[in-house]
């Protein structure tokens, strides 16, 4: 049964609305002022709210803002009741997130028509969102299965060839098969590490408070060397570009989890290597800026168009996946940003089509 909350300080009006809606088969609840309405909304969890604007203790605007802050009610249809008809007054409520207005006095037919229209629209939107979520789940399952099965198949195939032809293989053929196994192993390692770190973040095992208590000093020079090595392993294909470290300031130290920071930078370096032209160079630079350590990863690849750059940090999004023959789940950049931010830092991407991309990471220097 559809639940409707009516927040109205005029008792006669409130009772009349409740009677009309109850007669139509809705489950209804009334509240005599804004404060009571917010408390009732939190407990009653209505499917729609009808609310007066001019009320004691909390006006309708304040009620709307409070309701929109509740995760469980953020999208619930909200209809204002008002005796005022000026457009600026109505526009203010719509800007705050109201779905409709009814001007007093109104008939029962007008009230029911407004409610039915908002409930129908909400249902259509909910179905569309549900369909999008289901499609996203399906794609995610397919992507994870692909990223786990593909390297396993290549490893099993290479091992099968070696086991059946071990005495017949030339040394260079054996090295090729071992390289095939190594690349499949690196791909699996990448996916597993991503999933472990995402799990730690989601389970609040890797938070700012945890890092303050359990972190340790991390020397940036050592961090960059380790990140470049790991980034080469993460690069989908054997990188035809090289990575060069350029330290402008020595003895930079940050505080945190070295494995998480190494992984974050490795994701950025792997991306830069993957998009760099053959024989190109990726430059990893580090320097001090006030109380921050600044690390940049710069490539001279094709660059990212502005319309795609806006989505680059979105989970499961990959830039030109088909054209660039990318692997992975589209989690590299979003995961890197989350790991940097949990360390109190920030990540920014700047790109020029035809000239390349630069990712800038800022991390607070360790005190003392």
Image (tube, helix red, strand yellow):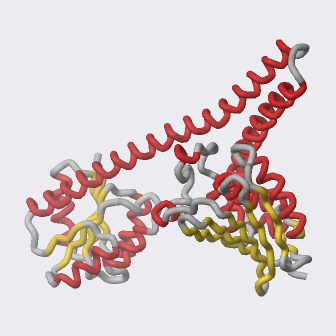
Q: Quadrant of the C terminus?
A: bottom right
Q: Is residue 118 left or right of residue 108?
A: right
Q: Position of residue 179 (x, y in %)?
A: 81, 34
Which of 129/312 is in front? 312
Q: Position of residue 24 (x, y in %)?
A: 16, 50
Instruction: Determine the residue located farthest toward the front in the rendered image.
Output: 279
Is residue 198 at all visible to an observer of this figure? yes
Q: Is residue 109 left or right of residue 340?
A: left
Quadrant housing residue 29 = bottom left
Task: Reply above or below: 60 against 280.
Answer: below
Is residue 267 at all visible to an observer of this figure? no
Q: Quadrant of the N terminus?
A: top left
Q: Give the residue at x 20% y 48%.
A: 25
Instruction: Determine the residue located farthest toward the bottom in the rendered image.
Output: 290
Q: Give the residue at x 90% y 64%.
A: 222
Quadrant housing residue 182 = top right
Task: Reply above or below: 331 against 102.
Answer: above
Quadrant housing residue 249 = bottom right
Q: Position of residue 319 (x, y in %)?
A: 54, 53
Q: Give the residue at x 91% y 14%.
A: 167
Which of 70/192 is in front? 192
Q: Position of residue 228 (x, y in %)?
A: 81, 58
Q: Give the residue at x 84% y 74%.
A: 247
**Number of dots carrying numbers:** 0
């Amino acid at each position: 049964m559809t639940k409707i909350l009516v927040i109205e300080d005029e008792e006669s009006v409130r009772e009349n609305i409740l009677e009309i809606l109850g007669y139509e088969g809705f489950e209804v609840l009334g509240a005599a002022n804004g404060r009571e309405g917010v408390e009732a909304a939190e407990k009653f969890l209505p499917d729609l709210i009808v609310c007066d604007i001019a009320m004691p203790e909390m006006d309708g605007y304040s009620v709307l803002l409070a309701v929109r802050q509740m995760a469980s009610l953020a999208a619930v249809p909200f209809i204002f009741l008002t005796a005022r008809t000026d457009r600026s007054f109505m526009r203010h409520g719509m800007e705050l997130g109201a779905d409709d207005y009814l001007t007093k006095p109104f008939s029962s037919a007008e009230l029911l028509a407004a409610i039915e229209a908002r409930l129908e629209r909400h249902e259509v939107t909910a179905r569309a969102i549900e369909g999008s979520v289901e499609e996203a789940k399906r794609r995610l399952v397919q992507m994870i299965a692909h990223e786990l099965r593909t390297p396993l198949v290549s490893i099993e195939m290479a091992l099968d060839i070696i086991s059946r032809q071990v005495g017949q293989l030339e040394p260079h053929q054996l090295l090729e098969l071992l390289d095939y196994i190594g690349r499949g192993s690196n791909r699996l390692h990448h996916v597993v590490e991503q999933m472990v770190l995402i799990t730690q973040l989601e389970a609040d095992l890797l938070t700012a408070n945890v890092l303050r208590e359990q972190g340790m000093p991390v020397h940036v020079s050592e961090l960059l060397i380790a990140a470049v090595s790991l980034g080469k392993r993460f690069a989908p294909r054997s990188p035809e570009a090289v990575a060069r470290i350029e330290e402008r300031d020595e003895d930079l130290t940050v505080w945190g989890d070295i494995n998480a920071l190494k992984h974050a930078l490795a994701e950025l370096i792997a991306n830069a290597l993957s998009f760099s032209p053959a024989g190109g160079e990726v430059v990893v630079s580090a320097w001090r800026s006030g109380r921050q350590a600044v690390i940049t990863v710069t490539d001279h690849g094709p660059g990212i168009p502005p319309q795609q750059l806006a989505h680059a940090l979105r989970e499961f999004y990959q830039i030109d996946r088909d054209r660039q023959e990318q692997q992975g789940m589209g989690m590299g950049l979003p995961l890197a940003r989350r790991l940097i931010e949990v360390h109190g830092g920030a990540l920014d991407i700047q790109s020029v089509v035809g000239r390349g991309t630069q990712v800038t990471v800022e991390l607070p220097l360790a005190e003392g």
